[in-house]
Image (tube, helix red, strand yellow):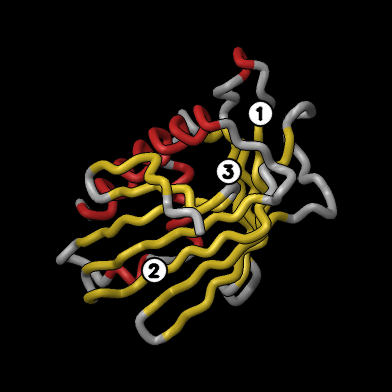
Amino acid sequence: MELDTILFNKEDLQFSRIETNNYKLTFSMENSNIILSKIINFELIQMIYSLNPDVYEKVELEKNGNDTEAVITLVMKHFFEDLGLVQRFSFLRIKKIIEENRILFVGQSIKSYRPSGIPENSELMSLENMTVVCDIITPHKIQFSINILFDKSMNIPTFVEKVVGVILFKIFKRVKHFVENV
């Protein structure tokens, strides 16, 4: 059994490779002024991406009527164009599941069609499964554990893994700062 390889570890954020194409991201958030579980929803997911316009070119979220399922379209900036790598986008169906002391978001890529407004030469960042576990430690503290399993057909170069860690840290810092200062 392969041990986790830590790719990035800084200020409470840890990004690691569990095995080929399987990654884990962990961090926590705390704010004594608000009940955090009340803001763990699809709007927070959209806000995460919207707070990072230097990372994402396009962010669209469409919820179903009862807030238990959404479809999100994300187009990342073309970071690796000079290296000959294609621009990537995500097109995910995400379900929200509420348990006693936990909120889960479970998603996977929609492969049956391509959403409109996606750059012509971009490729789907195909996820077999993504699970976001939000463990409610106290009403004011939540531990996040995100597991992402890419399709076997995805080839993720090692140097890209390291860059993704830095990008995730940038996103994490902005969102954490926003949430902890509400």
Instruction: Say left or right for 177 vs 89.
Output: left
Element type at mark 3: strand
The residue identified by callout 2 is 134
Other-residue count near label 1 (Cα within 10 Å), few / some / many at <14 / 14–19 / ≥20: some
Q: What's the amino acid at mark 1? A: Gln
The disc at residue 98 is none
The disc at residue 87 is 1
Instruction: Say left or right for 130 vs 84.
Output: left
Q: CA distance from mark 1 to mark 2?
A: 30 Å
The disc at residue 59 is 3
Q: Position of residue 23 (x, y in %)?
A: 50, 51
Q: Residue furthest right?
A: 112
Q: What's the amino acid at mark 2? A: Cys
Q: Is residue 177 above or below residue 134?
A: above
Q: CB of mark 3 within 8 Å of CB of mark 2?
A: no
Asked if residue 132 can be seen in this view, the reply is yes
Other-residue count near label 3 (Cα within 10 Å), few / some / many at <14 / 14–19 / ≥20: some
Residue under the point 28% across and 54% down: 179
Position of the C terminus by quadrant: bottom left
Q: Residue furthest left?
A: 32
Q: Select label 3 or label 2 by which is in front.
A: 2
Q: Is residue 8 above or below residue 151?
A: above
Residue under the point 44% across and 32% down: 162
Q: Position of residue 158 (x, y in %)?
A: 52, 32
Q: Residue furthest bottom?
A: 100
Sequence-wise, the earlier of marks 1 and 3 is: 3
- Of 131 and 30, which appears nearest the observer? 131
